[in-house]
Amino acid sequence: MNSFRAHRLALPRANAIIRAAASQNVAPMSAALVVVLPRAASSPSRSFHTTPAALKKSKAKKMVEQQEHNPSSSPSSASSSRNSASTSAADHDDDADAARHPKPDAADPLNTDDLTSRWAALDTHFRDALRRLATGGRFNPDSIGALPVAPNPKSPERFPLRELAQVVPKGGRTVALLAHDRAHLKPISDAVQASPDFNQQPQPSPDNDLELLLKVEPERKEDLVAKARALTLAWRERVRHASDRRKKVVAKWAMQKEIGPDLRKRVDAEAQKQQKKVMDGIDQVEKQTLQKFK
């Protein structure tokens, strides 16, 4: 209150000084003597980009974790199944896998053995995946046998289920898991129950203490079709990836004057011609696989 009163008393004096300065042609700098009454403090404004970096990272991490834990058998996860299949197939044409394939040679640029070798590895990988899908999907004995199991709860080491038990299809919709050791029964049961693909607790057999029974749930036709299409799409992507790798090598040869421009065009055209044959083969395999689901 006292502060407000003091400002009111000072205001007429300040205005009088300004009028006197104006009459004497004093420089406008004296206008700076105008008294401004204090205003109430406002709340600090928040800048537009104020999301903490740590919060952004935690959200991104959460999204990645949700993506990783989506069941591959879900109809809505066909795209994630495709990405998973594509990633698995990358083992066949990754740099670390280069020793398994012939090396391209600028001295013989029309020799495409390095490319056809990678395509052949992809052919084996995806044909096997489609075969397993067509003969039982995720409940195929091979798929069940590949399930990772941790036999020792104190160790992170995991082993394929087929190394700890025998997977035996029985009559009807039942698969038997014959454990090699009684101590493996609980780890096997826990792994099956925790798997998003199976999501059930195997039942102990009344006839054999080392046997667990797993009920086979038939997959929906539309789910199998979606998975088959995702696999063949990933197959095509990996074929193109292998072709692009070699095309970059050929471009490097041309840049280093190891081959001429005409030969480069001929090499690229030959690789494209061979790739078309591979793609036609994939189309045929996809058609045959989808016919099995009708």
Image: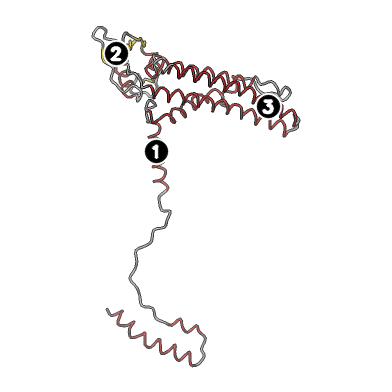
Point out residue 104 in the picture as x, y percentages from the top left corner.
Answer: 67, 23
Q: Residue furthest top?
A: 207
Amino acid at pointer 3:
Ala
Estimate how packed mark 3 is, as few (under 14), some (14 to 19) or many (20 or more) residues with alpha carbons within 10 Å.
few
Determine which of the numbered discs, if any, sits on residue 220 in the image: none
Horizontally, residue 35 falls left or right of residue 239, namely left
Q: CA distance from mark 2 to mark 3?
A: 55 Å
Which residue lies at the image location 27% right of the left edge and 7% below the top edge?
A: 208
Point out residue 97 in the picture as x, y percentages from the top left corner.
Answer: 57, 23
Estimate how packed mark 1 is, as few (under 14), some (14 to 19) or many (20 or more) residues with alpha carbons within 10 Å.
few
Q: Is the C-beta separation of discs 1 and 3 under 8 Å?
A: no
Q: Secondary structure at mark 3?
A: helix
- Viewer-side label of 2, 3: 3
Amino acid at pointer 1:
Met
Point out residue 65 in the picture as x, y percentages from the top left corner.
Answer: 39, 35
Q: Which corner quadrant holds the N terminus? A: bottom left
Closer to the N terminus: mark 1 or mark 2? 1
Horizontally, residue 256 falls left or right of residue 97, namely right
Determine which of the numbered discs, if any, sits on residue 269 in the image: 3
Q: Secondary structure at mark 2?
A: strand
Instruction: Give the answer, above or below, for where 143 lies relative to 263.
Output: above
- Viewer-side label of 1, 3: 3
Which residue lies at the image location 40% right of the left edge and 30% below the top edge?
A: 77
Depth check: give the residue in front, 88 or 160: 88
Amino acid at pointer 2:
Leu
Disc 1 marks which residue? 63
